Image (spheres, coloured by chain):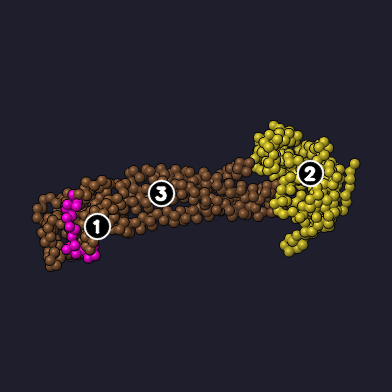
């Protein structure tokens, strides 16, 4: 009977109840959509970084990354790459010669990381050819072609076919330089690719480095869902003198960001739930004060305080029971719709890309978020009911009965 | 047999800093089967006395014993349970639960007392028939007239088989015909089922039917008359 009374009570003032239900719907939807979008940012950022820049695994000489000295190359890198390509779970392996140096154009100069790549395998591992916005992928120019990022081109005030000079230290420790002609300009959500890297053919740079047939880096792209640690452990066991790292070690900020974004769910949830608590408390308090005479009567005729308390809590839970599933359904529908086709944020693409984000966002939510949000809404409803229910049981029947 | 025994009841409260002596040293006994009216002018303390006798209000001093239990000594929740099981109330403004039907309002008390469903339904139907509302059982209070609502309130008050029924100005909002109908029902229940009724009223029509009239003035009993 108390449940029946509680259910009917919430429809006594339809507008007020619908406002609360509406705020629960909007709150739950906002929570799911907000979390979905944040996750989407994070997932697409991580995926972009892994698939277009750092790859799942990288192998170096143990001392190479200390100061990127080109003498610390990886022995038998080409053969190792060949071997790795047939390992289970490996979808691509490429080799790179790497040196930090200077890039200069007739107008400007700046820092650069020269990446001597194997164009065919680099395209498989990072899809660099798909990032071209101008020019070709190492075609047209036979001698010393270079591909640079759009931001670097802008900084150097150069365009397609312009000549740039790359200066670096060779294998003998001497400063050397080479002139390269820009055959392609690429654009990516990765800041490094856009601003820092200059991609040249491995054969051109090894000639200038004075090192032949070796590489500084092996980049390994694994199949999606494949546990990259299996490959990491296998490689480490087979080549204990090389240093193999997963993307978590190469870019620890990615994992940190993922954890931070996961915590954002709880922060966002706390903010929305606190706002909901105030809304529900306000409504239920009004309902209690409005019905104080009736509650007084109920207590006078024998409804004990526990039951009065329970009745108010149930009323609040009913509001959540109506609002939460609708909010969850709208949120889930929203996420699933945009998870497929993505949200086009190209109007803000410059700003987003400045931070390394893609302009098409694919919201994403783990299935585990839904039960967490559902539980959170019910806890919120119960917390919000406590004060109004307390006010209800504090009513004195004799005063409540004679109230207006 | 004594149903209610009040001893040296005093109720003083403060209204804007002024002490109001609503009930002053009242000693009173109500016996089983009485049909008693507590009467007097507005503000004489009728409702306050009735609320104290029914355990809804606390006296400043004195005691009320109902069926051997000193209710003035009970804690809040014990008192609520005591009221549930021993006292029926009929209020001036009907005060039914607006979201429940006449049947559900009548059944409510029995449900709180954990009566089995069949027994509950049987008694609720019987009571509503007794008060002449067997055709309105599924109507909510908003769809009933004042007189009909008050008859539902009587049915609700009797549902738990209380030791007595306290009625505070039950006819105040009713027209003559509804008043007559209500009083007939209560009188009949009193005569046939020996249910004790105590009214607080200044309605002459109620006084005319009462078998005992306790007159109050200034919070004191000034006259206690038995009518034959």
In the rendered image, the residue lying farthest to the left is A143
Q: Name the residue located 19 percent from the left edge and 62 percent from the top edge.
A: A72
Question: Disc 2 versus disc 1: distance between alpha carbons?
Answer: 93 Å
Magenta region includes residue B196: no
Q: Residue furthest bottom?
A: A174
Check the residue under mark 1 and report the chain it is in: A
Q: CA distance from mark 1 to mark 3?
A: 46 Å
Colour of chain B, in one word, is yellow
Tell if the residue under mark 1 belongs to the same chain as the one under mark 3: yes
Q: Residue furthest top?
A: B135
- Could you say which is closer to the camera, residue A56 or residue A398? A56
Q: Can you give x and y, in whole percent of width and height, for residue B13 in the image?
A: 75, 60
Residue, disc 1:
A240
Q: Can you identify the residue that label 3 sits on?
A: A33
The chain ID associated with circle 2 is: B
Query: Is A66 one of the magenta-colored residues?
Result: yes
Q: Which residue is mark 2?
A: B163
Report the quarter where the C terminus of chain B lies: top right
What residue appears at the point 34 percent right and 43 percent down from the top-left corner?
Answer: A340
User: In the image, which lettered chain appears brown?
Assistant: A
């Amino acid at each position: 009977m108390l449940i029946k009374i509680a259910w009917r009570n919430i429809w006594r003032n339809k507008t007020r109840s619908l406002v609360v239900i509406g705020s629960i719907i909007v709150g739950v939807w906002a929570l799911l959509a907000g979390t979905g979008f944040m996750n989407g940012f994070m997932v697409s950022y991580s995926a972009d970084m892994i698939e277009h820049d750092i790859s799942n695994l990288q192998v170096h000489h143990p001392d190479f990354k200390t100061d990127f000295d080109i003498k610390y190359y990886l022995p038998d890198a080409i053969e190792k790459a060949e071997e790795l390509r047939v390992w289970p779970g490996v979808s691509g392996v490429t080799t790179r010669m790497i040196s930090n140096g200077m890039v200069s154009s007739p107008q400007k100069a700046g820092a650069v990381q020269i990446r001597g790549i194997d164009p065919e395998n680099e395209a498989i591992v990072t899809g660099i050819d798909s990032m071209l916005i101008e020019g070709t992928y190492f075609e047209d120019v036979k001698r010393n072609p270079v591909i640079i990022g759009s931001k670097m081109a802008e900084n150097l005030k150069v365009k397609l076919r312009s000549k740039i000079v790359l200066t670096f230290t060779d294998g003998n420790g001497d400063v050397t330089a080479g002139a390269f002609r820009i055959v392609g300009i690429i654009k990516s959500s990765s800041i490094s690719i856009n601003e820092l890297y200059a991609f040249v053919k491995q054969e051109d740079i090894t000639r200038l480095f004075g090192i032949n047939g070796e590489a500084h880096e092996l980049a390994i792209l694994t199949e999606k869902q494949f546990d990259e640690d299996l490959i990491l452990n296998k490689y480490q066991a087979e080549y204990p003198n090389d240093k193999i790292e997963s993307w978590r070690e190469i870019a620890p900020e990615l994992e940190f960001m993922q954890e931070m974004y996961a915590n954002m769910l709880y922060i966002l949830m706390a903010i929305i739930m606190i706002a909901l608590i105030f809304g529900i408390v306000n409504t239920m308090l009004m309902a209690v004060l409005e019905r104080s005479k009736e509650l007084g009567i109920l207590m006078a005729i024998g409804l004990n305080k526990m039951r009065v308390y329970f009745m108010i809590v149930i009323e609040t839970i009913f509001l959540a029971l109506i609002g939460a599933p609708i909010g969850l359904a709208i949120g889930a529908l929203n996420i699933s719709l945009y998870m497929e086709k993505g949200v086009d944020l190209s109007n803000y693409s410059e700003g987003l890309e400045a931070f390394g984000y893609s302009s098409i966002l694919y919201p994403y939510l783990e299935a585990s978020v839904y039960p967490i949000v559902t539980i959170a809404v019910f806890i919120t409803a119960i917390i919000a009911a406590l004060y109004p229910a307390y006010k209800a049981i504090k009513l004195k029947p004799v005063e409540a009965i004679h109230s207006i | 047999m004594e149903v209610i025994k009040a001893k040296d009841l005093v109720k003083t409260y403060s209204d804007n800093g002024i002490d109001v002596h609503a009930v002053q040293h009242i000693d009173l006994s109500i016996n089983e089967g009485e049909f008693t009216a507590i009467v007097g002018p507005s503000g004489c303390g009728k409702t306050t006395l009735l609320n104290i006798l029914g355990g809804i209000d606390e006296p400043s001093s004195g005691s009320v014993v109902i069926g051997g239990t000193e209710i003035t000594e009970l804690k809040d929740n014990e008192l609520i349970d005591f009221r549930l099981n021993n006292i029926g109330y009929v209020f001036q403004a009907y005060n039914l639960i607006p979201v429940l039907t006449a049947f559900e309002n009548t059944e409510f008390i029995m449900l709180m007392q954990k009566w089995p469903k069949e027994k509950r339904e049987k008694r609720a139907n019987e009571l509503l028939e007794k008060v002449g509302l067997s055709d309105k059982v599924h109507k909510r209070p908003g769809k009933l007239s004042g007189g009909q609502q008050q008859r539902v309130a009587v049915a609700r008050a009797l549902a738990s088989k209380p030791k007595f029924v306290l009625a505070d100005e039950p006819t105040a909002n009713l027209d003559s015909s509804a008043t007559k109908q209500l009083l007939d029902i209560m009188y009949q229940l009193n005569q046939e089922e020996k249910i004790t009724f105590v009214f607080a009223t200044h309605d002459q029509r109620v006084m005319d039917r009462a078998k005992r009239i306790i007159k109050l003035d200034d919070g004191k009993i000034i006259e206690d008359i038995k009518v034959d």
